[in-house]
């Protein structure tokens, strides 16, 4: 089993990363005498929110050691990922490409992704009904939960990807339609009307979009680690620069990894409305302190252990993307009869 390693988040905009031997060196500017040094062998990923970037030597070392290196804008928008030689069995990727070109073969995998996503959305709702019955509209949440259950029953009958996307859209509308009910504290600062992206138009959407970006990067790294191409999917259409398979796989993980964490951060008042800023365009950004709080909490959550529903063993939360990527690869190789999605319990 893969071990959960450290992820280095570089949030200082003026920081520059370079290589010294087997260490990554972080300097706040090129004239600074003080620097931070970390051994590469302790790292699994490096995520940079800085403007200055990293040296070619460090990029090469990360590729050689299979360390993910991802560049985001300071507000969390994806820019680029550095990858080295393609790893894994070339036959696995050829099989992936072959399946992706055949709708009849792609649909069963896409069905599994959506079953996991909608079941986990429903679990988020049911947890709120159980744990906070005095604070939420139990009847309204129950109605949505029942509607999502009906969609779950219909999804396996779909024969085309557009049909699946239609059900996905209906489920998302139901889920996000009552998401505001799940916000128990700071309702004034974190009210949620609808999902908005590019840019996010309120504080809650800004927080969720940031977490979705983190999750996408983790899933893409997990897929590459098992030899799959994160840009060729089965549910999302292929587009230049779009990690379609990473978006596919993260569907079942978003409610558990991102939505639940966003709600916890707000309901526990770990983040507040003062930590969000509105741009001239109307988009909402997190300030540096809030972003660091979110990243710290994200890392701590990844260390928590959970019983994996398919493997029947306890693993750190942060390894779930790697386990699901492994199971998907095993299915494509013919070792499993079907891809088993992650169902949160």
Image (cartoon, helix red, strand yellow):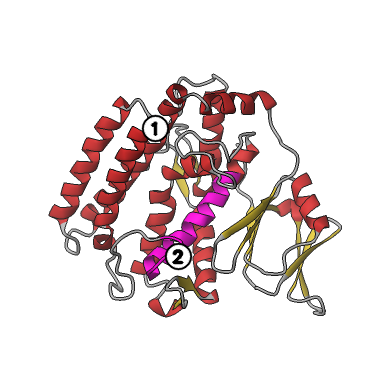
Helix, strand or loop at label 2? It is loop
Q: Is residue 99 in sight in this rendering?
A: yes
For image coordinates 41% across by 36% down, the residue present is 113
Residue 150 placement (x, y as % from top left): 21, 36
Instruction: Pick whichever, 155 or 183, lies toward us.
Output: 155
207 within the magenta span: yes
Which label was assigned to residue 161? 1
Residues in magenta? Answer: 197-220
Could you tell me what secondary structure mostly forms the magenta stretch? helix
Q: Which residue is the site of mark 2? A: 199
Mark 2 or mark 1, which is nearer the start of the sequence?
Answer: 1
Helix, strand or loop at label 1? It is helix
Residue 242 placement (x, y as % from top left): 55, 46
Q: Residues within 10 Å of mark 2 (few under 14, many from 20)?
A: some
Q: Quick check: 19 left or right of 205?
A: right
- Real-space CA distance between mark 1 and mark 2, rounded to the nearest whole angstrom: 27 Å
Res 74 → quadrant = bottom right
């Amino acid at each position: 089993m893969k071990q959960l390693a450290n992820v280095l988040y570089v949030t200082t905009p003026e920081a520059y990363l370079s290589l010294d031997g087997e260490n990554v060196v972080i300097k706040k500017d090129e004239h600074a005498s003080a620097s931070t040094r970390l051994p590469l062998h302790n790292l699994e990923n490096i995520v940079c929110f800085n403007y200055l970037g990293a040296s070619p030597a460090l990029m090469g070392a990360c590729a050689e050691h299979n360390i993910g290196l991802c560049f985001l804008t300071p507000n969390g928008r994806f820019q680029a990922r550095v990858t080295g030689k393609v790893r894994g069995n070339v036959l696995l990727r050829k099989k992936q490409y072959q399946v992706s070109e055949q709708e009849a073969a792609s649909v069963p995998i896409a069905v599994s992704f959506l079953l996991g996503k909608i079941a986990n959305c429903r679990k988020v709702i049911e947890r709120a009904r159980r744990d906070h019955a005095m604070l939420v509209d139990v009847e309204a949440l129950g109605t949505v939960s029942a509607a999502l259950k009906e969609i779950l029953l219909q999804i396996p009958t779909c024969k085309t990807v557009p049909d699946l996307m239609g059900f996905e859209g209906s489920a998302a509308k139901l889920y996000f339609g009552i998401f505001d009910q799940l916000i128990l504290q700071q309702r004034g600062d974190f009210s949620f009307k609808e999902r908005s992206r590019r840019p996010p138009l309120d504080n809650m959407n800004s927080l969720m979009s940031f977490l979705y970006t983190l999750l996408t990067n983790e899933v893409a790294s997990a897929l590459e680690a098992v030899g799959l191409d994160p840009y060729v999917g089965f549910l999302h259409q292929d587009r230049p620069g779009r990690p379609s398979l990473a978006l596919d796989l993260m569907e079942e993980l978003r409610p558990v990894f991102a939505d639940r964490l966003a709600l916890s951060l707000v309901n526990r008042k770990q983040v507040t409305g003062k930590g969000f800023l509105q741009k001239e365009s109307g988009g909402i950004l997190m300030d540096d302190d809030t972003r660091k709080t979110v990243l710290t909490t994200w890392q701590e959550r990844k260390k928590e252990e959970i019983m994996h529903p398919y493997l029947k063993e306890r693993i750190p939360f942060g390894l779930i993307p790697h386990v699901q990527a492994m199971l998907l690869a095993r299915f494509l190789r013919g070792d499993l009869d079907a891809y088993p999605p992650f169902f949160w319990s």
